[in-house]
Image (cartoon, coloured by chain):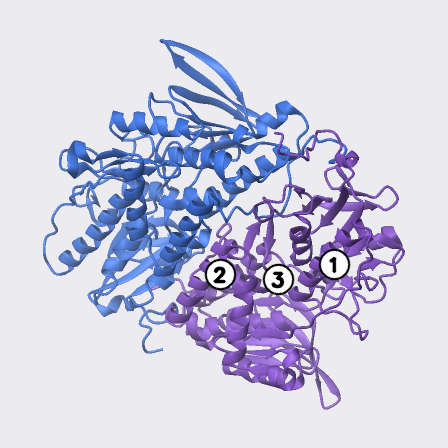
Chain colours: A purple, B blue
Amino acid sequence: MADHPVRADGPSDSGSGRHRVVIVGGGFAGLYAARKLGRDPAVEVTLIDRRNYHLFQPLLYQVATGALSPGDIAQPLRAILRRNKNTRVVLGEAVGLDPVGRRVALSDGGTVDYDTLLVATGARHAYFGHDEWATLAPGLKTIEDATEIRRRILIAYEAAEREADPLRRAEWMTFVVVGGGPTGVELAGALGEISRDTLRRDFRSIRPADARVLLVEALDRVLPTYPESLSRSAGRQLVRLGVTVRTGTKVTEIDESGIAVSVQSDGAERTERIPTRTVLWAAGVQASSFGRRVAEALGVETKVDRAGRVPVDADLTVPGHPEVMILGDLAIAKRQGGKPVPGVAPAAIQEGTYAAESILRRVRGQTPEPFRYRDKGDVAVIGRLSGVADIRWLGRFGRRSGFLAWGMWLGVHIVYLIGFANRLVVIIRWAWSFLTHGRGTRLITGEPHLPPIKQPEHLD
Amino acid sequence: MADHPVRADGPSDSGSGRHRVVIVGGGFAGLYAARKLGRDPAVEVTLIDRRNYHLFQPLLYQVATGALSPGDIAQPLRAILRRNKNTRVVLGEAVGLDPVGRRVALSDGGTVDYDTLLVATGARHAYFGHDEWATLAPGLKTIEDATEIRRRILIAYEAAEREADPLRRAEWMTFVVVGGGPTGVELAGALGEISRDTLRRDFRSIRPADARVLLVEALDRVLPTYPESLSRSAGRQLVRLGVTVRTGTKVTEIDESGIAVSVQSDGAERTERIPTRTVLWAAGVQASSFGRRVAEALGVETKVDRAGRVPVDADLTVPGHPEVMILGDLAIAKRQGGKPVPGVAPAAIQEGTYAAESILRRVRGQTPEPFRYRDKGDVAVIGRLSGVADIRWLGRFGRRSGFLAWGMWLGVHIVYLIGFANRLVVIIRWAWSFLTHGRGTRLITGEPHLPPIKQPEHLD
């Protein structure tokens, strides 16, 4: 056991003189920080996560829509960090912080001491005060979310195939995606493709292409963080996939058989009901509960945005607490010009890497530079061979839509996908789907309970 | 919709004059029957399954041990059968049979009429009257079983890593597999490999190689259906992977912290307790509940074996019911010499194909030949580069162990794996695991609730 320096029951290693870095959260920010710190003998790293794997979240919508398997976009944290002898992975849930004793409390009673704490527990979607919508309209943040959404989409088609009543059948064949950001656009595009293409020949009583896919967005355009020309292009590409884009439309009610929306048109507001059995949530953002506890324990003002995220200084530390850094979606970091750093994977990766470098500098007595966000641009994919891209450093020439954007998206996602086998597997699944117009992993898992369906007495 | 001949709400197609074949169960037997029947315009096929996918069960233990992802070994039934215009897939649970009206009842109140019924709902493992063991010692028949077993194995190592008490840590690091048939041997071999190889560098407080893996078998050797020399070889190969093989050992009790076994030695019997937190069940066989209902409705004697399986005639029909065939693990079919057809995938495939041919002959007024089982032999894999094979038609020369057996196993499983993308993905995952000694898909999914662990107050 001589090669296992850190032991749960052994003597404390705090006497080793090594700087103890505790990272909470194994998402992009936490993982990239751990990887960077992992080979430096001056530090001792503990990575705490409730899950035993790192999840490649940008591809989660592909699991939700049956194109990839959970195992394709997740890698065990222990496997990624196995060679980092100074690093220990703890499967556990951080629930409390003692900022004076510099100690993180876990849900099972254990504690972990730190010299520097990196909090990278991310954010979830927000239901804007309607938490009761969570079960009616699942969001997409975890693998369980993704398989649940996949299940609902597939069950809806199965139910429609069995349903005799045309009105109820139409309810099953209506899919509503709430939120026109990248996730909502990608989900709606995939839903359009599923109905038009993937399931084309799979059923005998329904025509999947008759399905209605609605993308509901409260603002006046989809992808509101993109340049307006790309938003327009994305809208057109969605329409081509059969998606009905409803901008200026706010969801006011959700129940089991439909949603109510309030529509802005010509200054007036009217209410409308849309019957549907499948509502997917891709809106809002809300700080993780551990993130909010950290802010509270440190006395940080989080009212800055209603999502409860934590404002940080230029070096990503919490004001007044140089030993605590907030990274990724949980942080409100500012760019040089004062604009906020966006909540996207490349930003989290940069912040994680920066945090590690900054710690290593401080351990060596140097002063870290402030964090500098390098905005490489945005890419979103909208179904087969199409998408939008905004590559900032190319200026106006970097704004692309269609095939070129799709190709960029493909390249970026394959390069960043962690794990060589995952990468190859994803490439093969994509190539296969592309050639066959299929989606191989559309499994309905979990105990098979079908929704109650009004059906004809005889099936044949 | 003109190209969709069968409609749930449309007029009954029974007037079409086509012979209506209803298949219950989309496993090997049911699926191969459906594929063979699928392009013949003389018949009209309905395939009923509770799941929307066909599962390649021989590789299920690889999902349970983190080498493959569920999506790698499952394919949507609709996708496999999409080109068969005479075939309709019904996602539903068959719960009853009216043999006079020739009608199958579904759990949601629907019914399906048949001219010929193929029942291929398989078998589950049996707890020999101890159904309360089901939650303590999960068996391996479904994808949910596999991810639950994967979860338990991984959580056990995580718990051991956190556990301060050496005795309790040893409990977490003891894995018991009950049943020395092919599934038990493959599971135990994989568990041995996980402890010795896969997780070697993943932990800091425990040495995964210290894990104890026990294979408990009531008979006097593992793989009792194989020739004795191969059983002995399999035993040796297991020992090389660190597995303790306990033959002549019967499980008499299972609870949350261990099992009790009764051991036969030198004619005497003694009881022994083995503390463990992880018991996996790979013993016994028991007819599916729909299978038993069918036997009851048709008045067939199923007391022939205690598993409740259904004896069939030489043409796989139920005695006195030429319109009902029982296929796969649910059937007790006899070979020419009188020996039973084994409950393995190749037998189910042959039976499914035979059933389809037999129906097509009868529809054309011909008399079907009796079913002839072609025994190609058995292969079981035991970890990396080893296994046992008994290729019957090669006689004594077909009995192989070690590398050659492993190679045969590899070839056979890749050839029979349905779906081109699945096949390539599986090859890549295997190649990658082989080169890196890793298992990429070891995800703990489901809501993250850790077992209560007695742990040190401080982790570091």
Residue receiving disc 2: A68
Q: Which-is-in-front pick, marks 1 and 3? A: 1
Q: CA distance from mark 2 to mark 3?
A: 15 Å
Amino acid under label 2?
A: Leu
Residue receiving disc 1: A327
Residue A338: image x %, image y %?
82, 73
Residue A123: image x %, image y %?
71, 60
The correct choice, above or below, for A323 with respect to B174 in the image is below
Do the numbered discs 2 and 1 sit on residues whose CB atoms are within 8 Å?
Answer: no
Q: Which-is-in-front pick, marks 2 and 3? A: 2
Identify the subunit bearing mark 3.
A
- Residue A139 found in image quarter: bottom right
Point 48% across, 73% down: residue: A193
The correct choice, above or below, for A452 with respect to B283 in the image is below
Does B313 sit left or right of A5 as displayed?
Answer: left
Does A60 sit left or right of B44 as displayed?
Answer: right
Identify the subunit bearing mark 1.
A
Q: Where the C terminus of chain A falls, by quadrant?
A: bottom left
Badge 3 element: loop
The correct choice, above or below, for B240 with respect to A35 in the image is above
- Earlier along the polypeptide chain: callout 2 or callout 3? 2
Point 51% across, 51% down: residue: A446
Amino acid under label 1?
A: Leu
Q: Which-is-in-front pick, marks 2 and 1? A: 1
Badge 2 element: loop
Q: CA distance from mark 2 to mark 1?
A: 28 Å
Residue receiving disc 3: A140
Q: Where the N terminus of chain A falls, by quadrant?
A: top right
Identify the subunit bearing mark 2.
A
Q: CA distance from mark 1 to mark 3?
A: 21 Å
Inspect this view and state whether residue A245 appears: yes
- Earlier along the polypeptide chain: callout 1 or callout 3? 3
